[in-house]
């Protein structure tokens, strides 16, 4: 039997690209296309490990490590929750795509050819599918219902600082953020301090009231802010948060005034 390694690598690259792109779209990661392509290249070349004489356990571990590397290359690492969500959704989309391909093979193929396999009688594969499918579907639908509302509040944000540097960030519309500059009534968005590494803005102290206390918040001006491709004309301040946000992958908390414009 002839094995065309180049075709196998190309096919695996294409499937990995679809999986990574689907993960990015579902989770609204706003990952750059080049990074997704590089992640797919890692997955495509990794198919060569199947031609190495390895035990099943070793091959399984290698597949897990390759998946982790693909996720890191495509989406980077912000925190463990962010990384774990990317990895889980990569596997979920793999299951959906794999199940679809299995169905096509099973329904349209009429003989055993290459990677297409048939079984005489009642296969153990059917038992696994019958038991696991309802569980997977239930968990997927339940998670999607919770994610749908939350992800609708995620925005792609491009902030240009006064020094001319532009950063592409992920913002979250926090309806509880009602911070305003008491001097000029400018809305305040909060940014994770880790994003500002290497940049020391000139800050002003703005009095703010939280649920439990009153404090002074370090704020600074920006040159321009673009949210989901729309330039925000209203002037706003950016406040520096010393605490990491609980939402995975979020770099800043947006103010409802600059989103709704009211």
Image (tube, grey):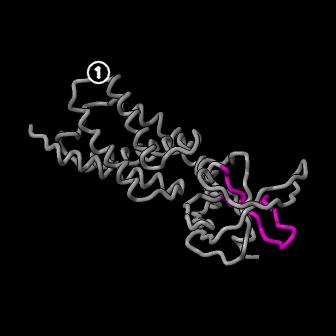
**229 drawn magenta:** no
**Considering only vertical position in the picture, is 66 above or below 182?**
above
**Residue shown at the point (42%, 36%) measured from the top left:** 129
Q: Residue at x 17, y 47 (%)?
A: 6
120 vs 115, nearest the viewer: 115
Are there few (<14), some (14-19), or many (20+) residues within 10 Å of tag 1?
A: few
- Quarter occupied by residue 238: bottom right
For label 1, the residue is 55
Residue sitting nearer the eye, 186 or 1: 186
Residue 251 higher or lower than 54, as above or below: below
Q: Residue at x 33, y 44 (%)?
A: 42
| Residue farthest along the right direction in this orientation | 213
Magenta-colored span: 172-193
Give above or below for 169 relative to 64.
below
**Residue 173 covered by magenta stretch:** yes
162 relative position to 61: left or right: right
Residue 253 in which image quadrant: bottom right
- How far across and down, in percent of the image, does residue 200 sit? 66, 56
Most foreground residue, 197 or 256: 197
Q: From the top left corner, tell me how far across and down residue 191 is, in percent.
A: 68, 56
Question: Could you tell me residue 14's position as x and y percent?
Answer: 30, 52
Q: Tell me which corner region of the image, top left, top right, bottom left or bottom right, holds residue 155.
A: bottom right
């Amino acid at each position: 039997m002839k094995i065309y390694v180049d075709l196998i690598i190309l096919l695996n690259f294409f499937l990995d690209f679809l999986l990574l792109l689907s993960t990015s779209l579902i989770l609204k990661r706003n990952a750059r296309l080049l990074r997704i392509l590089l992640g797919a290249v890692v997955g495509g070349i990794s198919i060569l490990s199947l031609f190495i004489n390895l035990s099943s356990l070793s091959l399984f571990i290698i597949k897990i490590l390759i998946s982790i590397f693909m996720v890191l290359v495509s989406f980077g690492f912000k925190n463990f929750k962010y990384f774990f969500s990317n990895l889980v959704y990569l596997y979920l989309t793999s299951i959906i795509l794999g199940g679809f391909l299995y169905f096509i093979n099973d329904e349209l193929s009429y003989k055993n050819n290459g990677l297409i396999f048939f079984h005489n009688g009642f296969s153990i594969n059917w038992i696994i599918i019958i038991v696991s499918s309802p569980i997977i579907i239930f968990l997927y639908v339940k998670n999607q219902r919770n994610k749908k509302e939350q992800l609708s509040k995620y925005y792609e944000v491009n902030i240009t600082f006064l020094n001319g540097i532009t950063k592409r960030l992920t913002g979250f519309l926090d309806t509880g953020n009602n911070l305003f500059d008491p001097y000029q009534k400018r809305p305040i968005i909060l940014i994770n301090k880790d994003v500002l590494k290497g940049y020391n803005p000139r800050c002003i102290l703005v009095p703010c009231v939280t649920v439990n206390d009153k404090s002074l918040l370090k704020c600074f001006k920006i040159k321009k802010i673009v949210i989901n491709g729309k330039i925000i004309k209203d002037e706003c301040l950016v406040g520096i948060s010393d605490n990491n946000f609980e939402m995975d992958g979020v770099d800043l908390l947006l103010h409802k005034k600059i989103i709704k414009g009211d």
